[in-house]
Image (spheres, rainbow, N blue to C red):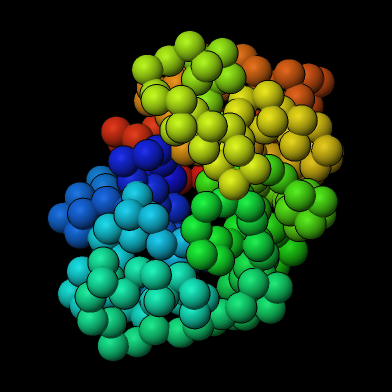
Amino acid sequence: MLASGSKGNAIYVSDGTTSILFDAGLSGKEMERRMTSRKISPSSINAIVVSHEHSDHIQGVGILARRYQIPVYMNQQTHEAAKSALGSISDSIHFACGNTFAINDLIIHPFSISHDANDPAGFTVQRNGAKLGIATDLGFATSMVREHLKGCDILIIEANHDSQMLTQGPYPWSLKQRVKSRSGHLSNDDTKELLIDVRHDQLKHVILAHLSETNNTHEKAFSTVIQALNGSKSDLIVARQDCSSKIIQV
């Protein structure tokens, strides 16, 4: 997790040969700094996969793509919505939610999620029997989302807000309603219930992502979601906005 939160999101995934960024929501300079801090060479990135067009997911995409000649994978509706922010990209490849595609040996399956963007996507990534699930920026975990997230070795899932903090917090009413809506963001309790549905004995790591700096705390997110892992050997990690997390190997 290179960055996670409302100010920017980016996930680094590699099998040792092929390296991918899922979103690049920080400036190009900060993306480079975060990668370098984890001894990742920006020139080693083989592709950037974009989940949706919100700025905290695409801010650095265009500049990294141009600077390092990186192809960008996104669906057609996301590309249309993000064109002005991305700028000119010489190598853009469109996928469709529901259709699996490969980047070298990494098998990626994009699936539709419920969020207020044009065609937002979650992803699973598979290689050599290992499976990673990514589902952030969603207001409701549909049965399809739950099905795709089953059987993962690593889960990256949103725990955006504590419901009481959101209700009592400083956001205007309209924004509170957006966050709580089915096209907004998952609460800590929502994430706990989702994890209860998809947990299994081989789940090794759960990473909580996209925490609100205003309406959540790391302690609240952890203490709520850990209840879903009671008795499990799974490791629970809370991703941060201000620094990259350690690299997790499976």
Residue 142 appears anywhere in the view: yes
Position in image of residue 78 (x %, y %):
46, 70
Quarter holding residue 22 = bottom left
Foreground pick, 20 / 71: 71
In the rendered image, the quadrant that contains the N terminus is top left
Say if 21 sits above or below 86 in the image. above
Task: Residue 63: give x, y in percent of width and height.
Answer: 20, 69
Residue at 39% over, 25% down: 172
Residue at image coords 49%, 79%:
76
Q: In this view, does 14 lie to the left or right of 61?
A: right
Give left or right: position of 196 versus 128: right
Instruction: Name the spot of residue 93 as percent of width and height, x first.
Output: 46, 84
Residue 223 rendering spot, x and y as whole percentages: 61, 15
Q: Give left or right: position of 186 versus 73.
A: right
Which residue corresponds to the image point at 58% horizontal and 32% vertical from the top-left? 180
- Figure quadrant of residue 67: bottom left
Q: In this view, does 88 lie above or below 240?
A: below
Residue placed at 76% from the left, 25% from the top? 228
Location of residue 66 with respect to 138 vertically, above or below: below
Q: Which of 183 and 25 is in front in this view?
A: 183
Give the residue at the far bottom of this rendering.
90
Picture quadrant where residue 123 is located: bottom right
